[in-house]
Image (cartoon, rainbow, N blue to C red):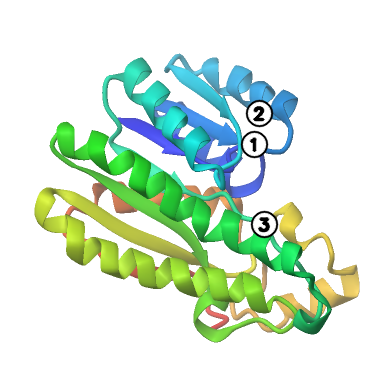
Amino acid sequence: MKIFISGASRGIGAAMARHFAAHGHDVAINGGNDKAVLLAIADEISAYGGRVLPLFGDVADYAAVQDFFAQTDKTFGKIDVVINNAAISHVGFFADMTQAEWRRVVDVNLGGVINCTHAAIPYMLRHGGGQFINVSSIWGSVGASCEAVYSATKGGVDAFTKALAKELTPSGIRANAIACGVIDTGMNDFLSAEEMAELVAQIPLGRQGKPEEVAHLADFLIGAKYVTGQIIALDGGIL
């Protein structure tokens, strides 16, 4: 399997890169913040023996994204799976956000998914099919206070995923999304220990999710041939 993962230098994306490389897949990993960290992840997972292609750049930049997929197809010969994981958050009252701040969240979280999807589709059609797995959030369906724009982008990802599945599944391209709840990543670092404890107390399973659990669900979706157009919650029962 030839898999592209955006936002793969940390958190959920890094866990996915490790998981799929460990299972013998060729993995193209993208990161846009720290090239050294991305290369370190690439070096780490190359030890599993599969091919690894690090692609540094911003998913909000469509020209860069087109180059990512051209390189991936050239290196691996095809693109089977695209995991749209790259995302950023902005915590604070919406009224206090600047236009530049909310545009950046929209450009990365929703624009990045659209860019990567649009750039990958021609390669999938050429090779007879493929699938998209979009990493979303439960806040896309219910909204999170002080993360209004983040919530809006994830709601957009959900709607895009459902529409895309209806459009592309007849051509052999499936699309699903994983709506994550509270996952133990650096995105939650803004919470104090007390605030995190209060949040975890609301989760029936009594803990945060692990990035590796998101990777396992993505792996399941790859093999679930009759599943498309679904937004699957991974939230410990909080909703």
Asked if residue 57 shows in the view, the reply is yes
Which image quarter holds the N terminus? top left
Q: Which mark is residue 9?
A: 1
The vertical placement of 177 against 36, above or below, is below
Q: Judging from the image, what secondary structure is the residue with disc 2 in?
A: helix
Asked if residue 236 shows in the view, the reply is no
| Precedes in sequence: disc 1 or disc 2 | 1
Q: Amino acid at mark 2?
A: Leu
Number of other residues with Cα within 10 Å of mark 1, as a class: few under 14, some 14 to 19, many 20 or more: many
| Precedes in sequence: disc 1 or disc 3 | 1
Location of residue 213 in the rendering, given as x and y in whole percent from the top left corner: 52, 53
Q: Amino acid at mark 3?
A: Ile
Residue depth check, mark 1 versus mark 3: number of the one nearer the observer: 3
Q: Nearer the viewer, residue 53 or 119?
A: 119
| Precedes in sequence: disc 3 or disc 2 | 2
Q: Which mark is residue 88?
A: 3
Location of residue 233 in the rendering, given as x and y in whole percent from the top left corner: 45, 71
Q: Which mark is residue 112?
A: none
The vertical placement of 113 against 162, above or below, is above
Q: Which mark is residue 38?
A: 2
- Does residue 157 appear to the left or right of 117 in the view shown? right
The vertical placement of 115 against 51, above or below, is below
Residue at 65% in and 63% down = 103
Residue at 72% in and 75% down = 200
Q: Judging from the image, what secondary structure is the residue with disc 1 in?
A: loop
Number of other residues with Cα within 10 Å of mark 3, as a class: few under 14, some 14 to 19, many 20 or more: some
Location of residue 90 in the rendering, given as x and y in whole percent from the top left corner: 75, 66
Circles 1 and 2: CB atoms closer than 8 Å: yes
